Image (cartoon, coloured by chain):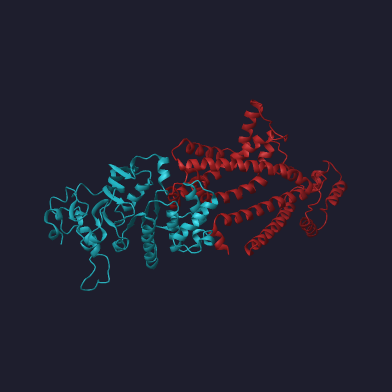
């Protein structure tokens, strides 16, 4: 492992710790008392006080922060106020479903972005170029709650082909995946098409052509390799969005993932659960972006040279 | 001996706002197997465009017309895509001007050569790799087994051009086109590369088209010389005959404006006054007419000169020469 990777890892740890502290403070500053939300509406003050003690939020703030950080380091985010279960357990239940949705959407989006974007770049006056612009415009202008609702309306309510929500096998993945794909596709498609257009104009493409390489190899290896670097940056941002931000899609489709869990936790002012979700998604985001930076170096030797 | 390549009356035009712009104007030449041809001219003379035409890689907007480009009995002007693909790299290979831009920065030297080989030969990776080592060796690339795993950015400019040469040699073509292949190199490296190309031509029996703006390099390559100006061929003949007895006023001007060891205050450089006409602005007359010191009034403006013999296999397209011979262009 190079000193570059170690340096970046250390940076990542610092970032995650700062995020943990920030989310702790922001939660305490925000309105709403978890004990009051948890307790019955007209509960006596001593009942509410009892909840406060149970939750441990009657202790001094610094002490709470200390025990939260100490627990987090050991992977223990405490007990959820709302579910009365270990936060880690709740996250581990929901995370795989979100990861599955994220992975399917990301792969789907990448396939379309690379395929359609490359075709559009190669043949700027073809139907593919038109389709690519149309899809990008549609995805960009249609928010997930709208496209999700339309998808449910057409394919679940109207045609009755697919379930409208929940999580029962692969078929319940299709509609949410399409909705999420539609929201991350536009940027990927635009970025790939533009970088592909630039890449195809490079002299090394003319060289590849002059040596009789097949067009498919020229496009999908010689040009795509160079065009993939900007796309990689977009993927990094998308993964962050997919891990934390598919909340809307998960809510629209009642999909039991991290996003839905986060929404419930927020409504209940479930400090430990919110903190746990934030730290897990933030860590994943930081790690993924570190990995993407390392992949950059693998693809482009010139970046590797600069770092050493 | 029958020529391996025979270019007959080829023109290349681009669509412009006010009619077509002609960048190569009715150019013809022939090349025999194992021989070399130097195409010399300034930037914009159309010499690179001719080369790209020979590989069918002229930009998409270009329209290439002509009687015929005969390559081993086939007409390159009338090839389908898959027929081109079989010729590119395998029969005719090109070395580009700038090896930094011409090689893919994200693919190793090894893989670029292996890809070129496997585009034409049905061989295993290991065989292609062995061939890559062989051609890199031929191109004077040091320690090919190890260093071919490098990326182009990890090599010097001279080494990159050797990679480009190895790439050109990879499928044993019978013609190599070097398009300003030494222009971006230091002078010392330039001399090495020219020497290497000449040796490879003799050793492997390649035909070579060497495109340059530097007439000094022409004599190092040898063979025939075709001088181009503003898209037109103006003089052709064996390199030494043309250089020792330049006949076209442009060739003469070009030689006088190049520095030599004999340049001195008594014998100063004499640049050609004026500028090359913009592409498309040459009318029906002589392309060099506007700058020519010996222009024939009333003739050069309206009519292009045909070829006149200036010696054995040495021709010139000049009205003044046709009218008055050598004395007229002095």
| Number of dots carrying numbers | 0
Q: Is residue B258 left or right of residue B152?
A: left
In the rendered image, the vertical position of residue B304 relative to residue A254, given as above or below: below
Q: Is residue B216 left or right of residue B247?
A: right
Quadrant that contains the C terminus of chain A: bottom right
Q: Is residue A76 left or right of residue B94?
A: right
Q: Nearer the viewer, residue A156 or A203?
A: A203
Q: Nearer the viewer, residue B120 or A255?
A: B120
Q: Nearer the viewer, residue A218 or B325?
A: B325
> What shade has chain B been given?
cyan
Tell me residue B129's x, y (percent): 52, 54
Quadrant that contains the N terminus of chain A: bottom right
Q: Is residue B328 left or right of residue A35?
A: left
Residue B7 seen in render: yes
- Please report the residue visible at 24 percent of the width from the left and 68 percent of the height from the top: B269
The extreme bottom residue here reads B265
> What shade has chain A been given?
red
Q: Nearer the viewer, residue A20 or A75?
A: A75
- Please report the residue visible at 53 percent of the width from the left and 41 percent of the height from the top: A115
Tell me where residue B79 sits by quadrant.
top left
Tell me residue A18's x, y (percent): 69, 58
Tell me residue B196's x, y (percent): 39, 62
Residue B273 seen in render: no
In the rendered image, the vertical position of residue A44 relative to residue B296, given as above or below: above
Tell me where residue A251 sits by quadrant.
top right
The extreme front residue here reads B1
């Amino acid at each position: 492992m190079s000193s570059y990777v170690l340096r970046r890892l250390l940076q990542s740890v610092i970032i995650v710790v700062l995020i943990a502290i920030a989310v702790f403070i922001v939660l305490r500053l925000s309105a709403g008392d978890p004990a009051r939300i948890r307790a019955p509406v007209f509960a006596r003050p001593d009942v509410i006080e009892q909840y406060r003690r149970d939750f441990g939020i009657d202790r001094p703030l610094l002490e709470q922060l200390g025990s939260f950080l100490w627990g987090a380091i050991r992977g223990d985010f405490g007990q959820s106020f709302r579910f009365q279960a270990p936060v880690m357990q709740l996250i581990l239940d929901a995370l795989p479903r979100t990861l599955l949705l994220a992975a399917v959407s990301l792969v789907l989006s990448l396939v379309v972005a690379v395929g359609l974007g490359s075709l559009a770049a190669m043949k700027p006056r073809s139907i593919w170029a038109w389709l690519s612009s149309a899809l990008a415009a549609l995805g960009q202008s249609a928010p997930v709650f709208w496209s999700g609702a339309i998808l449910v309306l057409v394919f679940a309510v109207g045609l009755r082909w697919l379930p409208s929500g929940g999580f029962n096998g692969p078929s319940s993945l299709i509609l949410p995946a399409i909705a999420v794909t539609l929201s991350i596709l536009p940027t990927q498609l635009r970025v790939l098409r533009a970088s592909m257009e630039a890449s195809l104009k490079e002299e090394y493409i003319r060289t590849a052509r002059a040596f009789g390489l097949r067009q498919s190899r020229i496009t999908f290896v010689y040009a795509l390799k160079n065009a993939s670097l900007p796309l990689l940056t977009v993927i990094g941002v998308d993964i962050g969005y997919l891990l934390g931000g598919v909340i809307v899609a998960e809510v629209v489709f009642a999909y039991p993932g991290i996003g839905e869990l986060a929404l419930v936790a927020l409504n209940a002012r479930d400090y430990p659960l919110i903190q746990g979700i934030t730290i897990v998604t933030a860590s994943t985001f930081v790690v993924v972006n570190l990995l993407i930076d390392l992949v950059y170096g693998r693809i482009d030797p010139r970046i590797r040279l600069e770092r050493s | 001996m029958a020529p391996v390549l025979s270019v007959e009356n080829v023109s290349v035009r681009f669509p412009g706002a006010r009619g077509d712009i002609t960048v190569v104007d009715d150019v013809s030449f022939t090349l025999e197997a194992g021989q070399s041809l130097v195409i010399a001219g300034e930037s914009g003379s159309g010499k690179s465009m001719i080369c790209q035409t020979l590989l069918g890689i002229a930009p998409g907007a270009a329209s290439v017309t002509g009687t015929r480009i005969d390559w081993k009995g086939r007409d390159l002007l009338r090839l389908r895509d898959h027929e081109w693909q079989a010729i590119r790299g395998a029969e005719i290979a090109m070395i580009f001007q700038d090896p930094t831009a011409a090689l893919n920065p994200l693919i190793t030297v090894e893989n670029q050569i292996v890809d070129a080989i496997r585009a034409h030969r049905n061989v295993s990776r290991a065989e292609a790799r062995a061939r890559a080592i062989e051609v890199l060796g031929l191109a004077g690339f040091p320690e090919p087994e190890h260093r071919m795993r490098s990326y182009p950015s990890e090599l010097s400019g001279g080494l990159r051009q050797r990679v480009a040469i190895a790439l050109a040699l990879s499928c044993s073509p019978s013609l190599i086109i070097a398009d300003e292949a030494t222009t971006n190199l230091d002078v010392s490296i330039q001399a090495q590369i020219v020497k290497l190309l000449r040796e490879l031509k003799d050793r492997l029996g390649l035909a070579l088209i060497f495109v340059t703006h530097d007439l000094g390099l022409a004599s190092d390559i040898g063979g025939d010389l075709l001088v181009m100006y503003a898209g037109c061929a103006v003089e052709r003949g064996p390199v030494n005959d043309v250089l020792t007895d330049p006949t076209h006023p442009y060739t003469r001007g070009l030689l006088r404006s190049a520095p030599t060891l004999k340049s001195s205050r008594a014998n100063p450089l004499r640049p050609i006054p004026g500028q090359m006409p913009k592409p498309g602005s040459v009318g029906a007359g002589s392309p060099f007419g506007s700058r020519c010191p010996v222009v024939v009034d009333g003739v050069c403006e309206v009519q292009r000169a045909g070829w006149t013999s200036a010696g054995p296999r040495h021709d010139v397209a000049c009205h003044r020469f046709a009218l008055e011979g050598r004395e007229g262009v002095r």
